[in-house]
Image (spheres, helix red, strand yellow):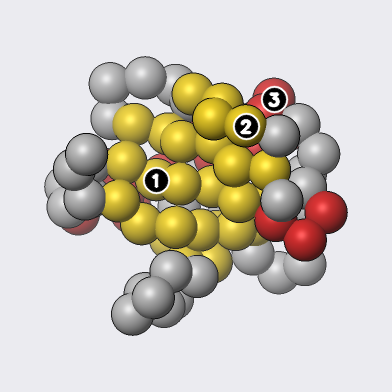
Amino acid sequence: MGKYITVQPAYGREFNSVKAVLESWNADQDFAAIGFGQHGYLNRLDWVRAGAEDSIEVRYGKNGMKVMVITKDTKGVKLDG
């Protein structure tokens, strides 16, 4: 597994479906970094420009209990939830 960053929807937004997460991501809306040692906000365009991490782990749903991964070569892969 390559490098990844963990994020959740920013500014109090909540999503309950993969479709809603991807719509927000593809609209370049901000997500908040929440992983250990990670902080700040980023959106799809920031991630593409930085060219750093291989994937984005998105926590969503009630209390971030659902998880999906967005990679640079896919539009989004649902892991669980």
Q: CA distance from mark 2 to mark 3?
A: 14 Å
- The answer to whether residue 18 is left or right of residue 51 is right
**Nearest the eye: 12 or 35:** 35
What residue did someone put label 1 on?
Answer: 56
What residue did someone put label 3 on?
Answer: 19
**Nearest the eye: 67 or 48:** 67
1 shown above or below 10: above
Q: Quadrant of the C terminus?
A: top right
Q: Is residue 52 visible?
A: yes
Helix, strand or loop at mark 1: strand
Helix, strand or loop at mark 2: strand
What residue did someone put label 2 on?
Answer: 80
- The answer to whether residue 30 is left or right of residue 23 is left
User: Would you identify the image quadrant in which residue 50 lies?
Assistant: bottom left
Which numbered mark, 1 or 2, is in the foreground of this view? 2
Number of residue marks: 3
Q: Position of residue 53 (x, y in %)?
A: 22, 50
Residue under the image location 39 percent in, 75 percent down: 36
Identified by mark 3, the residue type is Lys
